[in-house]
Image: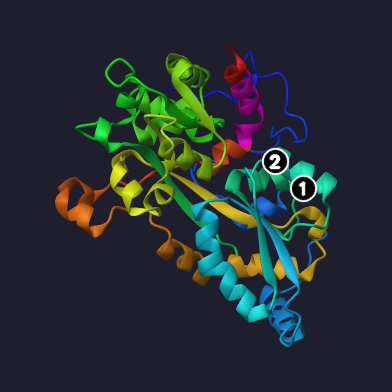
Amino acid sequence: MREVTLFSFSFLHGRSSGTPSPHSQKQEPSAGTISRRKALLAGLGGGVISLAPHTVLARSARKHAVAHTDAALRVLTFSGKICETQKKILFAGYTRQTHHRIITSGWDGSLTALQQQEKTNPKHWAAVMMENSSLALGGSAGLLAPLPEDAAEPNYSTSIDYAIAWDSSRFDTPPNWGDFWDVARHPGRRSLRRDPRTTLEIALLADGVPSEMVYRTLNTQDGLMRAFRKLDQLRPYIVWWSTPEEAGQILKSGGALMGLAPTGEMLNTTVGDTKRFGICWQQRLQIRYGWGVPHSSASTAAALSFVSWLDQAQQQQAFSNAWPSLPSMRDMAVDNNLRHLAAPLVVDDIFWINHLNIIAEHFEQWALRK
């Protein structure tokens, strides 16, 4: 299939406000990852702060080891089970070690929200949790601080799987993405993320595109239009969500028959809800998230130290161990198909870094149409 640049598409003439054009960013052939350091340094040039994270952490710990328990770091993260797990597994330990309290606030992780926060609350936030592609674009827009010169370079801090979740009382067999679109056999609302990321990939999967061909297809004019035509079929039945917590709430409240939701949001819940909902493990997607420091907090040693600590491998592993993202041993014993799960479709950060600004504009126009 011939690949063409997205920027030649007839509808792609405008640009989203607040973020630069990605014309100068070259599409790399390998899919999937971008280092967090590259993400945060993208477009910021020089002025890198030469501050070793372990040195800052040790210095900070000594400074606050006595009685400064009122010192607080404010964090923007995702409400719901993600934040609950972070508080228990990550933030409580950091407070014990450094005496910095962590105060969390929920948000949708968007560049628009970050831009507004930097405008109205500069120097207020120590760290923000964002999707990897958003981290890169936030760096290009000057909204995020560069990492210290000698910081570690993990590709991401957290991976979260998303899959079809459904009311198990309404289905005899687990639905796939094709069933998700079959409103004749399965009438009812469907919940999807109000963002082209994951949503366009799912549309192509539902249209029969193999997972390994999704981004090659999406990187052509015909493929992109194919995804939107598929979404047109489902438009009257879609309930949109903007945060992982909202995705779970829509399903738990009966707002949709089935929908895309974080697997951990559906599993890390009450026993009644866990039994009530099924998850299609075979066709899940994976989103990679990382931590950034808002540009207004770039000179704050405590903020830089905190994000460097969050990026360490032991913290990443601790969160992964606590976040339920695979079937239980009991479920695998009952269903042999769950013992040999295929890898998830990883949302391609490089693709979206290059194309999110313009595709998002067209996606929003499409979503607003009646």
Mark 2 is on which residue type?
A: Leu
Residue 334: x and y in percent read 15, 51
Q: Which residues are magenta?
A: 354-365
Mark 1 is on which residue type?
A: Leu
Upstream in the sequence, badge 2 or badge 1?
2
What is the tally of numbered marks visible in this picture? 2
Residue 111's tag is 2
The image's colour scheme reads rainbow
Q: Is residue 202 above or below residue 128?
A: above
In this image, 348 relative to 14: left or right?
Answer: left
Residue 143's tag is 1
Evaluate if marks 2 and 1 touch, with contact meaning CB atoms under 8 Å apart: yes
* Few, some or many residues within 10 Å of mark 2 (<14, 14–19, 20+): some
Quadrant position of residue 355: top right
Q: Which residue corresponds to the image point at 19% horizontal and 32% vertical from the top-left?
A: 172
Judging from the image, what secondary structure is the residue with disc 2 in?
A: helix
Does residue 157 appear in this view?
Answer: no
Does residue 262 appear in this view?
Answer: yes
> Along the line of sight, which residue is nearer the eye, 133 or 92?
92
Q: Which residue corresponds to the image point at 59% horizontal and 48% vertical from the top-left?
A: 132
> Along the line of sight, which residue is nearer the eye, 294 or 77?
77
> Along the line of sight, which residue is nearer the eye, 357 or 277?
277
Quadrant position of residue 297: bottom right
